[in-house]
Image (cartoon, rainbow, N blue to C red):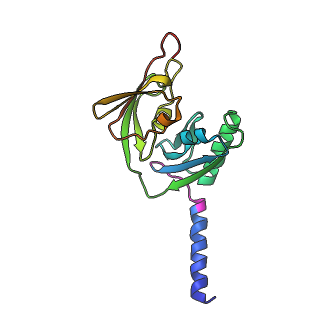
C-alpha cells in the first residue's frame, strides 16, 4: 500500500469516528429504526423525528427523550432503556442516525381534539399519522383513536388507528387531524 492510499484510509477512518461521536443539535432531525419488537409495532416507531429547540424528541408511548448534546448511539441506548423501564418492550434495539445537514424540511400540521398538546405539530418528511398524534402527546384519557378524523384537500376521512394500515398514512402539509371524544360506550 502506497503512502497516498494509506493517507486516504486514515482520513476515512477519522471521518467515520467523528460521525459516530458527533452530537445531535437542536432544530435538526434524527432517523430512528427499531428492531426486536413485533413487526406491526415497528411501523409506529420507525421514521424521522424532529429535534425540538428544547433538546428532545418525542417517542411513541414514552414521550420526550433528551437528544441534544448526545451522540446518536447514546440516544439509542436512552430510548432502549426507557422502553424497557416502562415495560413496553423487553428487547428493543434502536438505531439513531443524525441528520446533520441543518434544519430539515419542516412543515406544520394541526392536531386538535382530545390530545395532550393540541395545536400545530412540526411535520418532517415521512411522518405518519400515528407519529404526529404521538408528537402531540397522544390521545388523552377522553380521546378515541378509533375514530380519528383526517382532513386533506377539503375531504374528510374517519380512521380507526387500532388498525396498522391507518397508522402508516403519511401526512402532507396543511393536513388537519382531530382526535374525537370517546362516546358513552368508550369508543
Q: In this view, does 24 lie to the left or right of 81?
A: left
Label the magenta part by its dominant secondary structure: loop
Quarter of the view holding residue 5: bottom right
Pinpoint residue 109: horizontal percent, then vertical percent.
37, 36
Residue 157 placement (x, y as % from top left): 37, 28
Q: Residue at x 61, y 66 (%)?
A: 17
Residue at the extreme left: 154
Q: Going by the picture, which residue comes out furthest to the top? A: 184
Residue sitting nearer the eye, 106 or 186: 186
Q: Can residue 102 be seen in this view?
A: yes
70 to 155, vertically: above or below: below
Residue 151: give x, y in percent of width and height. Answer: 34, 30
**Compared to 2, does 165 lie above or below?**
above
State how many labels appear: 0
Is 27 or 145 nearer to us in this picture? 145
Q: In which quarter of the image is the N terminus?
A: bottom right
Q: Is residue 100 left or right of residue 13?
A: left
Q: In which quarter of the image is residue 101?
A: bottom left
Q: Magenta stretch containing residue 160, yes or no?
A: no
From this viewpoint, is residue 71 visible?
no
- Image height check: is 150 above or below 81? above
What residue span does the magenta drawing correspond to?
20-27
Say which quarter of the image contains residue 154: top left
Residue in the image at 60% along x and 78% along y: 9
Seen at 40% across and 39% down, the residue is 171
Where is residue 96 shown, x and y percent of the image? 58, 51
Amino acid at each position: 500500500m502506497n503512502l497516498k492510499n494509506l493517507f486516504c484510509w486514515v482520513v476515512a477512518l477519522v471521518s467515520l469516528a467523528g460521525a459516530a461521536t458527533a452530537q445531535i443539535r437542536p432544530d435538526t432531525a434524527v432517523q430512528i429504526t427499531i428492531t426486536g419488537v413485533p413487526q406491526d409495532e415497528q411501523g409506529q416507531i420507525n421514521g424521522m423525528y424532529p429535534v425540538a429547540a428544547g433538546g428532545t424528541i418525542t417517542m411513541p408511548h414514552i414521550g420526550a427523550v433528551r437528544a441534544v448534546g448526545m451522540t446518536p448511539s447514546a440516544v439509542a441506548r436512552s430510548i432502549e432503556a426507557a422502553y424497557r423501564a416502562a415495560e413496553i418492550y423487553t428487547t428493543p434495539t434502536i438505531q439513531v442516525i443524525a441528520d446533520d445537514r441543518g434544519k430539515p424540511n419542516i412543515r406544520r400540521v394541526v392536531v386538535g381534539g382530545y390530545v395532550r398538546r393540541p395545536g400545530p405539530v412540526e411535520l418532517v418528511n415521512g411522518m405518519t399519522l400515528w407519529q404526529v398524534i404521538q408528537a402531540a402527546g397522544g390521545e388523552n384519557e377522553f380521546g378515541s383513536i378509533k375514530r380519528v378524523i383526517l382532513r386533506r384537500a377539503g375531504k374528510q376521512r374517519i380512521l380507526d388507528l387500532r388498525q396498522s394500515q391507518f397508522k402508516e398514512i403519511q401526512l402532507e402539509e396543511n393536513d388537519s387531524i382531530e382526535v374525537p371524544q370517546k362516546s358513552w360506550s368508550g369508543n
